[in-house]
Amino acid sequence: MGPALRNLTEHWNQADLVDYLTDPKAWHAKSPRLAEYTKRFPMRMPVPDLTPEQRAQVAALILGWK
Ligand code: HEM
Protein backbone atom coordinates (compact mmCIF):
# COMPACT_ATOMS: atom_id res chain seq x y z
CA MET A 1 0.00 0.00 0.00
CA GLY A 2 3.01 2.29 0.48
CA PRO A 3 6.79 2.41 0.29
CA ALA A 4 9.03 0.44 2.66
CA LEU A 5 10.04 2.59 5.62
CA ARG A 6 13.75 1.90 5.52
CA ASN A 7 16.88 4.07 5.53
CA LEU A 8 14.71 7.16 5.84
CA THR A 9 17.72 9.16 7.07
CA GLU A 10 18.85 9.21 3.42
CA HIS A 11 15.94 11.56 2.69
CA TRP A 12 14.66 12.97 5.98
CA ASN A 13 15.71 14.77 9.10
CA GLN A 14 13.52 14.70 12.20
CA ALA A 15 11.90 18.12 11.65
CA ASP A 16 11.01 17.49 7.98
CA LEU A 17 9.64 14.04 8.74
CA VAL A 18 7.39 15.45 11.48
CA ASP A 19 6.21 18.03 8.94
CA TYR A 20 5.53 15.29 6.37
CA LEU A 21 3.48 13.29 8.90
CA THR A 22 1.48 16.46 9.63
CA ASP A 23 0.58 17.04 5.97
CA PRO A 24 1.91 14.36 3.58
CA LYS A 25 0.23 15.82 0.51
CA ALA A 26 2.03 19.14 0.87
CA TRP A 27 5.32 17.30 0.26
CA HIS A 28 4.32 16.00 -3.18
CA ALA A 29 5.03 19.45 -4.61
CA LYS A 30 8.36 19.68 -2.77
CA SER A 31 9.72 16.21 -3.54
CA PRO A 32 9.74 14.58 -7.00
CA ARG A 33 10.52 11.28 -5.26
CA LEU A 34 7.30 11.43 -3.20
CA ALA A 35 5.33 12.66 -6.22
CA GLU A 36 6.55 9.58 -8.11
CA TYR A 37 5.25 7.35 -5.31
CA THR A 38 1.76 8.73 -5.88
CA LYS A 39 1.86 7.11 -9.35
CA ARG A 40 3.21 3.82 -8.02
CA PHE A 41 0.77 3.31 -5.14
CA PRO A 42 -3.01 3.46 -5.59
CA MET A 43 -3.76 4.87 -2.12
CA ARG A 44 -2.57 8.11 -0.62
CA MET A 45 -0.59 8.37 2.56
CA PRO A 46 -3.20 9.18 5.23
CA VAL A 47 -2.70 11.99 7.73
CA PRO A 48 -1.96 10.09 10.95
CA ASP A 49 -4.24 11.03 13.82
CA LEU A 50 -1.47 11.80 16.32
CA THR A 51 -0.61 14.51 18.82
CA PRO A 52 2.52 16.57 18.02
CA GLU A 53 4.37 14.60 20.68
CA GLN A 54 3.30 11.27 19.18
CA ARG A 55 4.30 12.46 15.67
CA ALA A 56 7.76 13.30 16.99
CA GLN A 57 8.01 9.87 18.61
CA VAL A 58 6.90 8.03 15.45
CA ALA A 59 9.34 10.06 13.33
CA ALA A 60 12.23 9.27 15.68
CA LEU A 61 11.28 5.58 15.71
CA ILE A 62 11.07 5.09 11.94
CA LEU A 63 14.20 7.20 11.29
CA GLY A 64 16.03 4.46 13.19
CA TRP A 65 14.83 1.65 10.89
CA LYS A 66 17.53 0.27 8.55
C1 HEM B 1 1.87 4.35 11.21
C2 HEM B 1 1.50 4.47 9.95
C3 HEM B 1 2.33 5.09 8.84
C4 HEM B 1 3.53 5.72 8.90
C5 HEM B 1 4.41 6.05 10.11
C6 HEM B 1 3.87 6.09 7.53
C7 HEM B 1 5.02 6.77 7.15
C8 HEM B 1 5.34 7.11 5.85
C9 HEM B 1 6.55 7.78 5.46
C10 HEM B 1 7.69 8.20 6.39
C11 HEM B 1 6.51 7.95 4.11
C12 HEM B 1 7.60 8.57 3.23
C13 HEM B 1 8.47 7.43 2.74
C14 HEM B 1 9.74 7.89 2.05
O1 HEM B 1 10.19 9.03 2.24
O2 HEM B 1 10.31 7.06 1.30
C15 HEM B 1 5.25 7.38 3.64
C16 HEM B 1 4.81 7.40 2.34
C17 HEM B 1 3.64 6.84 1.88
N1 HEM B 1 2.72 6.17 2.63
FE1 HEM B 1 2.77 5.98 4.66
N2 HEM B 1 2.86 5.66 6.69
C18 HEM B 1 1.91 5.05 7.45
C19 HEM B 1 0.74 4.48 6.99
C20 HEM B 1 0.34 4.41 5.68
C21 HEM B 1 -0.87 3.77 5.20
C22 HEM B 1 -1.89 3.08 6.10
C23 HEM B 1 -0.91 3.93 3.84
C24 HEM B 1 -1.91 3.49 2.81
C25 HEM B 1 -3.12 3.11 3.05
C26 HEM B 1 0.28 4.65 3.46
C27 HEM B 1 0.61 5.00 2.18
C28 HEM B 1 1.72 5.72 1.80
C29 HEM B 1 1.99 6.13 0.43
C30 HEM B 1 1.13 5.83 -0.80
C31 HEM B 1 3.18 6.84 0.47
C32 HEM B 1 3.86 7.50 -0.74
C33 HEM B 1 3.95 9.00 -0.70
C34 HEM B 1 2.69 9.75 -0.36
O3 HEM B 1 1.56 9.31 -0.75
O4 HEM B 1 2.80 10.80 0.30
N3 HEM B 1 1.02 4.94 4.60
N4 HEM B 1 4.57 6.88 4.71
Image (cartoon, helix red, strand yellow):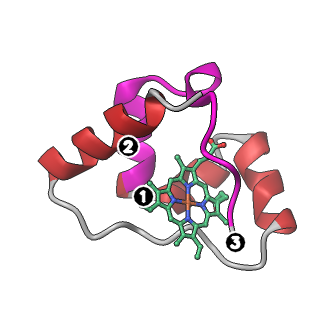
**Residue at the bottom extreme, as displayed:** 42
The residue carrying pointer 2 sits among few (fewer than 14), some (14 to 19) or many (20 or more) residues within 10 Å by Cα, namely some
Is residue 14 covered in magenta? yes
Q: Which amino acid does label 2 sit on?
A: Asp
Looking at the figure, which quarter contains the C terminus? top right
Q: Depth-wise, is mark 1 or mark 3 nearer the camera?
A: 3
Is 35 on the left or on the right of 39, as rendered?
left
For residue 34, side relative to residue 49 (left or right) = right
Q: Nearer the viewer, residue 24 or 61?
A: 61
Mark 3 residue's CB less than 8 Å from ligand 1: yes
In the rendered image, which quarter is residue 48 located in?
bottom left
Residue 61 drawn above or below residue 47:
above
Q: Distance between the residues labelled 2 and 1?
A: 6 Å
Question: Crowding near pointer 3: few (<14 within 10 Å), some, many (20+)?
Answer: few
Q: Quadrant for residue 38, please give it.
A: bottom right
| Label annotation for residue 10 | none
**First-in-chain label (1 vs 3):** 3
Pointers 2 and 1 in contact (C-beta within 8 Å): yes
At 35% from the left edge and 55% from the top edge, which residue is drawn? 22
The amino acid on which the numbered mark 3 sits, given as a three-letter code, is Met
Residue under the point 57% across and 49% down: 27
The magenta segment: 2-21
Name the image quarter holding the N terminus: bottom right
The percent position of residue 55, horizontal first and vertical second, equals: 26, 49
Q: Name the residue under label 2.
A: 19
- Report which residue position mark 3 lands on: 1
